[in-house]
Amino acid sequence: MSKTILKQEIEQQPQVVRSLISRELNDVANLAKELRGHFNHVVIAARGTSDNAARYAQYLLGAHNHLPVALATPSLFTIYKQPPKMADSLIIGISQSGRPPDIVAVLEEGRRQGQPTLAITNKADSPLAKAAEYIIPLKVGRERSVAATKTYTASLAALALFSGCLNHEARTLDELEKVPDYMQQVLQGVDDVHPSVQRYRYMDHCVVIGRGFNYATAFEISLKIKELTQIIAEPYSSADFLHGPIAIIREGFPVMMVAPSGPMLNDLTELIERIIEMHSELILISDVPEILGRANLAIRLPAGIPEWLSPMVAVLPGQIFSLALAQARGLDPDQPKGLHKVTETW
């Protein structure tokens, strides 16, 4: 695999996450202490890759902090100018650039309503950061490739750090500190994926399936496939997929599944069996040898990753697959057609 800017940034992610955790731990612990007890639910505004980080936060803050989490509808704040009441909410804005006016507008309205606001962004001097009362700066350095990678995993790490500090749980923070090592283990086998991806260079559609914490991973991987390869890739929960979309499966249809160990594994394994029976082309990201051995393309995760942290690791094979597939199709993964690094929406 040639050394693109995107590959370099994929390879930076273990160190990016390690640095964020060590650098921001004390500040996040302090802001969590200040916020504790001042909200009963969370509203998150985000777009694109950051929206997928917000999906992770729905499971994370719901399961670990017992908080209902809603995704904001920014056009209510900007175009309709009829924002909902957000009493007793923490308003979180997630944006790599911190520039989208609609995301900024949600936080500005949150402050106008007297609610606490938190920005998670790579640009500490951005409009989003200035609109927020609190900020977790990602500080990943400039992300030069158009497709986001290190800002995504850093956003997940920031959310995980905030969740752990909000509960002041030493165990969860200890588990989080081990994530960069798991990420590095995945990246050690990066070049092994490239030759196997060649068989998918002519596909024009696929689905990506995950559930639970990795519902967000399915969305993020499908976004990377679309951005980098111009292939139609649709994300689904395994539960939603059974409610109709499974009808699209036919012999040879490509299905990527994210199935790490955890409470969702039995559910995902049952769907894997059905997909195999339908003679689909199964691409599997997992740490479970029994099901990896049944895939057409198996990408192994390290064993022992706590499920709540697995999205930071499981997304890496999807990034690598998308990069390799773009190159196999003769596309430039650093400059995908029709895309810009910063997109401002209203």
Image (cartoon, rainbow, N blue to C red):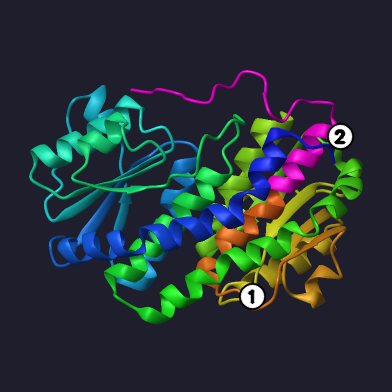
State left or right for residue 113 relative to residue 141. Answer: left
Location of residue 192 in the rendering, given as x and y in whole percent from the top left corner: 87, 54
Q: In the picture shown, does residue 303 fall above or below 249?
A: below
Give the prevailing secondary structure in the magenta stretch: loop
Q: Residue at x 19, y 67 (%)?
A: 33
User: Which is more toward the observer, 282 or 221?
Assistant: 221
Q: Residues within 10 Å of mark 2 (few under 14, many from 20)?
A: some
Q: Which mark is residue 261?
A: 1
Residue at which label 2 appears = 328
Earlier in the chain: of badge 2 and badge 1, it is 1
State left or right for residue 17 relative to residue 173. Answer: right
User: Which is more toward the observer, 101 or 276?
Assistant: 101
Q: Residues within 10 Å of mark 1 (few under 14, many from 20)?
A: some
Q: Which residues are magenta?
A: 319-346
Q: Residue at x 78, y 33 (%)?
A: 326
User: Which is more toward the observer, 51 or 241?
Assistant: 51
Is there any visible trace of residue 324 in the rendered image?
yes
Is there any visible trace of residue 240 in the rendered image?
no
Check if residue 158 falls in the magenta segment: no
Check if residue 341 falls in the magenta segment: yes
Q: Residue at x 58, y 55 (%)?
A: 15
* Amino acid bearing label 2: Ala
Q: Quadrant of residue 63?
A: bottom left
SS at badge 1:
loop
In the orientation shown, which residue stands out farthest toward the top?
338
* Amino acid bearing label 1: Ser
Location of residue 189 in the rendering, given as x and y in whole percent from the top left corner: 81, 59
Which of labels 2 and 1 is toward the front? 2
As measured in the structure, the alpha-carbon distance from the residue carrying label 2 to the one carrying label 1 is 31 Å
Q: Quadrant of residue 64?
A: bottom left
